[in-house]
Amino acid sequence: MNRRRWWHECAEHDPDERQCAGGPSGVKAVDGLNFDIYAGETLGLVGESGCGKSTTGRAILQLYKPTEGTVEVAGKELTKLQGEDLRKQRRQMQMIFQDPYASLNPRMTVGSIVSEPMEVHNIGTKSERIERVRELLKVVGLNPYFINRYPHEFSGGQRQRIGVARALAVNPSFIVCDEPISALDVSIQAQVINLLEDLQEQFKLTYLFIAHDLSVVRHISDRIAVMYLGKIMELADRDELYANPMHPYTQALLSAVPIPDPVVEEKRKRIILEGDVPSPANPPKGCNFCTRCPKVMDVCREQEPVFKEYGSGHYTACWLYPQ
Amino acid sequence: MSRLLEVKGLETRFFTQDGVVHAVNGINYHLDEGETLAIVGESGCGKSVGVMSLLRLIPMPPGKVTAGQVWFGTGDDRKDLLKLSDDEIRQVRGNRIAMIFQDPMTSLNPVLTIGFQISEALMLHLGMDKEKARKRAVELLELVGIPRAAERLDDYPHQFSGGMRQRVMIAMGLSCNPQLLIADEPTTALDVTIQAQIADLVKRLRDEIGMAIIWITHDLGVVAGLADRVIVMYAGFIVEEAQVKELYGNPRHPYTIGLLGSLPRLDATREHRLSSIEGLPPDLIDLPKGCPFYARCNYRIEICATDNPRLEPVAPGHKVACHREVTRETPYTVEIEPAEVVA
Ligand SMILES: Nc1ncnc2c1ncn2[C@@H]1O[C@H](COP(=O)(O)OP(=O)(O)OP(=O)(O)O)[C@@H](O)[C@H]1O
Ligand SMILES: [Mg+2]
């Protein structure tokens, strides 16, 4: 894989200034994040509800303006772009949403939903756009014949395909997939995963794949970032993360995921975490995970550990390892 | 172990403006004392309606249990729940069968304290006085792992997190020492680490108290570590039933084979393409004449279009509703293209 740095976000972290990263509630969901996404890869971002996964995805797409930090795409700093330049850059970056029911305008036909991004970016004539929509529908496995129908006439999986077609319309190179399958039935999830994999190969796409389901993330990602209460706790190549999880949170998360095999389940030992996830509005002092960590030490409650590389490409932020 | 529950020919319909919804279509199954049975299947296949029918919780109209018997109890105690008076069935629901749901907020009263809601059930069903009921409520909350239980009695449901509310529901369910706990997707709305806590709790309580459990879910992962036996439902029918290891090790219905093949596994060691089941489940208002899985089945043959196969034994304790003897190794008879199945 070409490890050209495609996307880079670097944020200065100031612990006294836990302010809003653009979210409406004044909750700072994403702070001090620092990671790259390489061209053509899938970076999986996992974590539990409310940990800031979606906010991260949106901050990258500049749907939120981060109050601090920078987002660089292919060497250009997005936070500094304005007007036409920002619009051009945005065209490179599209998003697929979690809820295929809420994310499509119920009053628009499939045709206008899919062609809207092309209109926004002034691409093609009307008839060219219609031709392109038909083609896109075929690409995502829908009958082009559906072009004049409305979202409510489709199943969840089909609506998700419409969302994928829309995201592909302007030939993006980078797509943020925000929980694209979690609202779908088990038998439909695999359809959408396979589709995303095929499209990545066909169009050389780069994905940020956000999900809470670690089995799915393991399947689809090249590298995985584990997030907890707005912080990246660990980042590593997929197989490395599963074989040698360093952070106690990653270890607990991996052990909590059920494996659909009773013979394996019988022999598994679970790390059962105590307690609940603290509110993101009021994270604990020190390491964010200190209130639930089975290996917590005094220092963890005092000071935040540094996010550091230990071995090639394996990063974690934990006091168990030399700082 | 003796038989606790026997469901025979259960059939439930909804009579709606659009037509008759065939939600549950003549299902047969049983449950022994202390056994854990999982009912799996995707959204709308009749899992919830199936168990709500047992307890006569189907809204009537538009719903109606149109056929069947539900034998519950052991020895002389054995009764057909569908024939009980309203009073008698209420007794069963409060005392002998407990039910917990996916969203605990729908079954907790938001304006009453947790302590009041638990002790009310104890006073009503077990005839305890107020003081005794409060003491027992604290014990129950401790049993399900709520920290500082005594202090939290006077809290309201919204002051608890999702996982804690589900624990409260379990505490309430257990308050009357039920013989059967029915859990309808109790962990689906929860985060994985909290899901693991709840599954662990239920297993521990089952071993301590010895109640039987019906666990409804679409998550084949959770089931693997929890159930003794599994029933797979599709379009209101049971299509396969087996002991948990047999079902995962040797699935025999094309739908089960497809479902298991479509799951990514955390412990997968090699990259592979997921096998997906193309298409959608049938419309329950307009069920096809033959096998309900026909349109999506890679193993179908001619007879499947016209005859719906019955659930028949293929091995001890293993039943399948399929005209063919399919295993994971059986080659496909047809490839189903995504575009072939249209809205
Ligand atoms: N009150 C109702 N009126 C009409 N149809 C209903 C009603 N309740 C349920 N149904 C239908 O009965 C069928 C079975 O529903 P049921 O709730 O049992 O599905 P389920 O397997 O529990 O699904 P899920 O996994 O989504 O909970 C569905 O097709 C549903 O639309
Ligand atoms: Mg249900």
Image (cartoon, coloured by chain):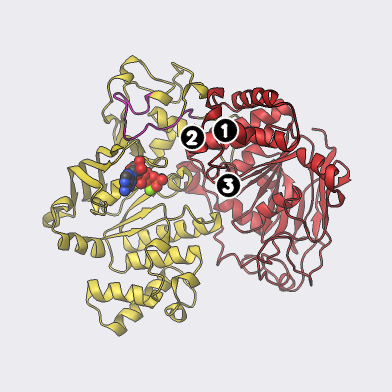
Chain colours: A red, B yellow
Tags 2 and 3 on a common chain: yes
At mark 2, the secondary structure is loop
Closer to the N terminus: mark 2 or mark 3? 2
At mark 1, the secondary structure is helix
- Report how far apart the C-alphas of labels 2 and 1 lie in the structure: 10 Å
What residue sits right under mark 1 in the picture? A110
* Quadrant position of residue A196: top right
Crowding at dot 1, Cα within 10 Å, few <14 / some 14-19 / many 20+, comes out as many
What residue sits right under mark 2 in the picture? A154
* Quarter in which the C terminus of chain A is drawn: bottom right
What residue sits right under mark 3 in the picture? A213
Magenta residues (range): B277-294
Q: Decide whether residue A93 is among the magenta residues.
A: no
Residue placed furthest toward the front: A126
- Report how far apart the C-alphas of labels 1 and 3 lie in the structure: 29 Å
Question: Which of pointers 2 and 3 indicates the residue nearer the eye?
Answer: 2
